[in-house]
Image (tube, rainbow, N blue to C red):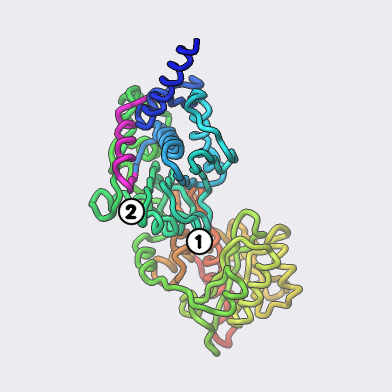
Amino acid sequence: MEATKKEQIDENLIEIERCQDVIYFLTKYGKVRDKLKGVIPWEPWEHLLKYLEVLRTYRFVIVLKAKQIGATWTLGGSNLHLAMYQTGANVLTLSKGEEQATESLDYSRFMLSQLPDFLRLKVGKDQSSLITFPSRHSRLRALPSTEDAGVGFGGATRVALDEFEYHPHDRKNYAELLPPILAGGQMVIQSTADRFKMSYLFKELYVAAKHADNNFYPIFFPYDVLPDRTQDWYDSMPMAAKDKECRFPRNEDEALATSETTMFFSKAALDTMETRTMLHIGHEMSDRYPTVRIYKPPIIGERYYMATDASEGREDPHCIVIIDKTGEQVAESHGKTHIDTVAAIHDALARLYNADNTWESGPGGAGGLLTSKLDALSTPKRAPTINVGKRPFELDYQSGKKGWWTSGSLWDVGMQELEEAIRLHQITPHSIEAITEFRQIIQPEGDKPRKVGGGSDDYVDAWMRVWLLKKLLPTGTMRVKNFSYG
């Protein structure tokens, strides 16, 4: 019995040694969950073996892929292997949101749970966003793509950006995470493509990699890398052709295509505007309120216009935009903060710039709260409410009401006016975030303009309001109550 036990221990030690090869480790011990089949072995398909070879060969890897080809499970298994076999390994996965981050770490957690006892390392912390292995001084961490994700993270053995095309703060997160990786570490970016995503850092990086213009090694996995994905399978998919090309591309051109025809705002105009953005300057207002950016200080005698997209700060950010009489942006505030602070910022900026101002109002919600708080602050130069029941629109000077409720008519007319202003270069945004939002407004055939799934429209709303306000208010001593819309 003793000899048999010793032989088993020796065999286990040999097997642990063999598992230093990630391909051997996953091929023999990898398990995944399948929605239909339950728990099944990880499949060593040719494209996944290639993926693993690339991961252990190159420091910078970018993967453009079709959906549901096993890449996410494979990356999760590779991350687990790295944390188990490299002492001090620090592996970070960044996902679109908190739910997706938890799920991405769960791939590694599930594979760990399926390992035999002799191979499975003892876990220290086991949380929704963190797994640690004290004996290896290593850890696996998963975070959502928030504005501050990656700030102060320090060095990492590997940073994995999963489904990067859909990250709401892709550019900011990338800028924070890249410098430490350049000093030492690996960055892996993988994603399907979104043809409605007009701010496309993922596509930019992939195309640059194809032209050897950055450090990334590019891989493309089309829909038919799986053996059962035949042409008949593709043809039978109950999905619109354009959606099919996006989610199950046959070639790189299909995967990288964007639907410029569905962009509501002029791409050419936005491209030009992006070259004219500027950095904000230091100002005491920004010191007092971190969400405030001052691009140009107020000039005595100049006329300014301001509008606020209200928010209570729990889900969506608020947005305040101030422009001068030429349509150039001079200041903004954007971020998640309590409605009391939003009101204080609105009031302070209105006074600083002596700006005619309006905001998203309403019978309740954030707009209603903001209206009551601005009343209490006696904010100066609050513009009258807008009468959207008339064509052309009128400012309602008689009712004494302030703030603009977001009706369908206001949105429809306001968006058409903003589209014209962008196309004719009548406005000059200085915030790159605003231009990013403009790129994410689409207009499907026969439909109204709207934000893409996962996108935001806080800047869009504020810009629409401030531009309408400028057009509706008098420019001199004559009171102009309306404008034509056709």
User: Residue 204: which numbered mark, if any?
Assistant: 2
Q: Which residue is mark 1?
A: 415
Picture coordinates of residue 379 (x, y %)? 69, 77
Above or below for 173 versus 379: above
Picture coordinates of residue 169 (x, y %)? 48, 55
Badge 1: residue crowd in 10 Å (few <14, some 14–19, many ≥20): many
Residue with the most extreme left position: 211
Picture coordinates of residue 155 (x, y %)? 44, 54
Residue with the most extreme top position: 1
SS state under label 1: helix
Residue with the most extreme bottom position: 301
Residue at the image position 40 percent from the left and 31 percent from the top: 70
Q: Which mark sits nearer the N-terminus, 1 or 2? A: 2
Between 72 and 204, the one lying in front of the other is 72
Between 22 and 470, the one lying in front of the other is 22
Between 361 and 71, the one lying in front of the other is 71
**Residue 471 appears in the picture as rendered:** no
| Membership of 57 in magenta stretch | yes
Residue at the image position 48 percent from the left and 47 percent from the top: 94
Picture coordinates of residue 455 (x, y %)? 50, 52
SS state under label 2: helix
Residue with the most extreme front position: 2
